[in-house]
Amino acid sequence: MTAIDHLPAEPVTRAPGLLRRLPTSGVAMCGLALILVWVLAAILAPVLPLDPPNKSFYAALAHSAPSAAHWLGVDKSGRDILARIVFGARQVLTVAPTAAIAAYLIGCPLGLLAGYYGGWVDAAISRLCDVILSFPIIILYVILISTIGPSVLNIVLAVVIAASPGIARIVRGLTLEQRHLDYVAAAQLRRESAVFIMLVELLPNCRGPLITDFCLRIGYTIITIGIMGFLGLGLPPPDPDWGTMVKEGTVMISVHPYVSLFPAIAIVTLVLGFNLLADGLRELALKE
């Protein structure tokens, strides 16, 4: 036995995960900061010194511009714009992530099945996805919401129907890249079930691109909710809806443009936060 045999084995160190390396990305941290501002505003909305979002201050209509009493002014119904934006953030930050998560719960299994099994399973799922993706996305949303009616549940359902095929195609492509690698072959030699291989082996190894897409997907959903509100198909009144606020402000935009401007800025900043976070995560994923 040589002296080398007595040397202690060096511990195997793993590179820190994607989320652990998040603080090293300035772009991602800027995006996260924007998101956290809105998250904190939404959480603290009931205890912040804000007026009720649906209360009309008719006396303020004569001087609806921003003032000490109403920092961002009031809308055409005399409701405080700042209060409606902050309380509207609660709706957006509830509906958008919920819809994105629900879409992933449908799209991921479909993509895994198509990529892992191939053959007729892949063909059937891919053709179904192609049919849905052939519709222009906005037209598809308008058709779905107009048919089933505007509500929180129906908006989530519409996002799931429209977004799941795109998610399935992303997961399918990632699965096709991974399914012939050694770790999958080792799991098959251990006689692991197909469900175990897909959920425990394949899916975690696709997490980098999926986390990035998830952040972008939330941003797309926020834009969709805003568009639906602008078209009159958003969250039902009297709940504050940023898209509806932009729409209502257009009747007085030539005189008081801030009525539409401030909720539009809210949409832009929140979507920008998720896009910056996604960009930072993508840069970190490429460095792995």
Image (tube, rainbow, N blue to C red):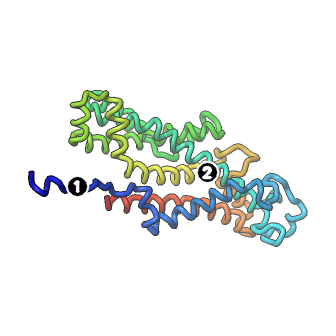
* The C terminus, quarter of image: bottom left
Estimate the x, y position of residue 148 in percent, counting from the top left.
Answer: 61, 33
Pick whichever, 1 or 104, lies toward us: 1
Q: In this image, 4 relative to 123: left or right?
A: left
Q: In this image, 42 relative to 50: left or right?
A: left
Q: Nearer the viewer, mark 1 or mark 2?
A: 1
Q: Name the residue beneath numbered marker 1.
A: 8
Q: Residue at x 59, y 52 (%)?
A: 227
Estimate the x, y position of residue 106 in percent, counting from the top left.
Answer: 46, 35
In this rendering, is residue 258 above or below 123?
Answer: below
Identity of the residue furthest to the left in this view: 1
Q: Residues within 10 Å of mark 1 (few under 14, many from 20)?
A: few
Pick whichever, 140 or 125, lies toward us: 125
Mark 1 element type: loop
Quadrant hosting residue 196: top left
Estimate the x, y position of residue 2 in percent, counting from the top left.
Answer: 9, 54
Estimate the x, y position of residue 39 in percent, counting from the top left.
Answer: 63, 56
Mark 2 element type: helix
Q: Residue at x 85, y 56 (%)?
A: 56
Question: Residue 204 bears which disc, if any?
Answer: none
Mark 1–mark 2 Cα distance, whole angstroms, equals: 52 Å
Pick whichever, 190 or 251, lies toward us: 190
In this rendering, is residue 229 above or below 278?
Answer: above
Q: Amino acid at mark 1?
A: Pro
Q: Residues within 10 Å of mark 2 (few under 14, many from 20)?
A: some
Pick whichever, 213 or 249, lies toward us: 213
Q: Name the residue beneath numbered marker 2.
A: 93
Dot placed on the residue nearer the N-terminal end, 1 or 2: 1
Q: Residue at x 31, y 45 (%)?
A: 174
